[in-house]
Image (cartoon, rainbow, N blue to C red):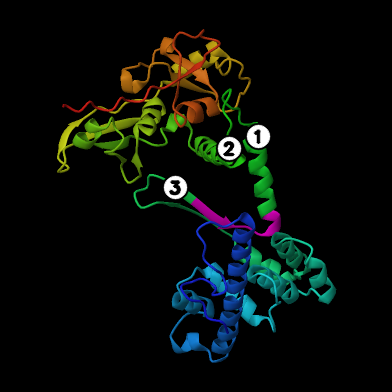
């Protein structure tokens, strides 16, 4: 087998200035060399698997052993092992196409199907393999048993992620549900959000709906939520660091404003050693009779042009963080999207000079950086 020197095929001649055709030729030559090396790796892995090398080295599986020994991802290791299971790799094709074709054959594709697959891109070949794969009662049960959904935060809990898998019918049902719910959420004029962003908004809305139904406001579902603030760090950057919910994630200024707007919280200010400097009285939620009065007065979302009636909520025109009160004149009714997304997540704020029944937004002014002394 031809060995590469310096990571480049020896037949490629280096040149400082090359035409696009020469660059493309070199690119294709590199891919062909990579394909040959991967094919050779697959042959070696086939022999090593027969020797059960992963058992000898105490690895859980051949995939884990391959990923560890070659320092590659599990996806690449899986592709190599798929190629190793094939009796022979196709010549004069990329390694990815060879793997996709091997999967097509393993799924039941015959010689005619392989020949037909040559006219399609790799993604279509993978879909063809899925169409040939048999779905048995056993495999359906296994798919159902392997369903999972996980929510987890990053190292400082400033961002949360989800991952999961669903069996076919359940997954399609969840997909259609989120698509429809996302399409029903209104938007801010001039703002374009992707379907994925709107589906994330819809998931949060769904969770809040469920918790609000199971634990209505009158029962004070969250009790008093303690928010700890490190005085030194928070003061130096406008609250962008230093805030943390008790037993929960770190939060920034917008999240704190959102809590002050709707939840019952107590702010505890600490020094850098964790010693309490001051603790506020619990900031109470908007009284229920005031909520009812404001809802009756406004009759719906007061944003100009919005007809949504989804999760109508009162919002403080002058934020609580800036001394705003629960008085009806300082409250206006907003739908869930304009309240939670446009204001508390997208940084918009109401224009206090806009008409009460036709509220408009203005972009919040960012805090100016400190001026350093000369």
Kindly identify which residue carries mark 2.
198
Quarter-of-image position of residue 164: bottom right
- Magenta segment: does it hold 166? yes
For the point 70% across and 74% down, the residue is 92
Q: Which mark is residue 160?
A: 3
Q: For the residue carrying disc 3, how many other residues have a C-alpha within 10 Å: few (<14), some (14-19), or many (20+)?
A: few
Quarter of the image for the C terminus: give it: top left
Sooner in the amino-acid sequence: mark 2 or mark 1? 1
Sooner in the amino-acid sequence: mark 3 or mark 2? 3
- Which is more toward the observer, 149 or 236? 236
- Which is more toward the observer, 30 or 200? 30
Q: For the residue carrying disc 1, how many other residues have a C-alpha within 10 Å: few (<14), some (14-19), or many (20+)?
A: few
- Which is more toward the observer, 277 or 160? 160
| 353 up-or-down from 51: above or below | above
Residue 195: horizontal and vertical position, in percent? 61, 40
Residue segment shown in magenta: 162-170
- Mark-to-mark CA distance, 3 and 2: 16 Å
Label 2: state its secondary structure.
helix
Residue 61: horizontal and vertical position, in percent? 51, 79
Q: For the residue carrying disc 2, how many other residues have a C-alpha within 10 Å: few (<14), some (14-19), or many (20+)?
A: many
- Magenta segment: does it hold 163? yes
Residue 161 as seen in the image, left or right of residue 94? left
For the point 50% across and 27% down, the residue is 342
- Which is more toward the observer, 142 or 29? 29
Kindly identify which residue carries mark 1.
183
Marks 2 and 1 in Cβ contact (< 8 Å): yes
- Mark-to-mark CA distance, 2 and 1: 8 Å
Quarter of the image for the N terminus: give it: bottom right
């Amino acid at each position: 087998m031809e060995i590469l020197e310096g990571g480049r095929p020896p037949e490629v001649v280096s040149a400082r200035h090359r035409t696009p055709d020469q660059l493309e030729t070199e690119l294709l030559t590199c891919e062909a060399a990579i394909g040959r090396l991967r094919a050779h790796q697959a042959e070696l892995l086939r022999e090593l698997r027969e020797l059960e090398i992963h058992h000898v080295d105490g690895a859980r599986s051949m995939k884990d052993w391959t990923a560890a020994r070659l320092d590659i991802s599990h996806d690449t290791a899986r592709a190599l092992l798929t190629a190793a299971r094939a009796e022979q790799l196709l010549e004069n094709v990329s390694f990815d196409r060879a793997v996709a074709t091997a999967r097509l054959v393993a799924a039941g594709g015959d010689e005619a199907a392989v020949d037909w697959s040559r006219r399609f891109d790799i993604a279509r070949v993978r879909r063809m393999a899925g169409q040939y794969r048999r779905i048995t009662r056993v495999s359906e049960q296994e798919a159902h048993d392997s369903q999972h959904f996980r929510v987890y935060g990053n190292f400082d809990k400033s961002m949360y992620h989800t991952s999961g898998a669903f069996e076919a019918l359940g997954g399609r049902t969840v997909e259609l549900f989120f698509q429809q719910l996302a399409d029903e959420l209104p938007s801010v004029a001039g703002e374009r959000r992707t379907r994925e962003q709107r589906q994330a908004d819809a998931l949060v809305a769904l969770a809040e709906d469920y918790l609000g139904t199971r634990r209505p406001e009158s029962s004070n579902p969250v009790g008093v939520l303690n928010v700890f603030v490190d005085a030194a760090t928070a003061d130096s950057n406008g609250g962008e660091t230093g805030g943390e919910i008790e037993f929960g994630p770190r939060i920034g200024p917008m999240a704190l404003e959102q809590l002050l707007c709707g939840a019952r919280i107590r702010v505890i200010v600490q020094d850098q050693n964790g010693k309490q400097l001051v603790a506020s009285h619990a900031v109470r939620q908007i009284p229920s009779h005031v909520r009812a009065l404001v809802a009756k007065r406004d009759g719906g979302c007061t944003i100009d042009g919005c007809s949504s009636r989804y999760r109508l909520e009162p919002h403080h025109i002058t934020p609580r963080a800036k001394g705003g009160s629960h008085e009806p004149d300082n409250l206006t009714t907003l739908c869930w999207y304009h309240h939670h997304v446009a204001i508390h997540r997208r940084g918009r704020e109401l224009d206090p000079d806009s008409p009460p029944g036709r509220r408009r937004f203005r972009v919040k002014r960012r805090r100016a950086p400190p001026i350093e002394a000369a």
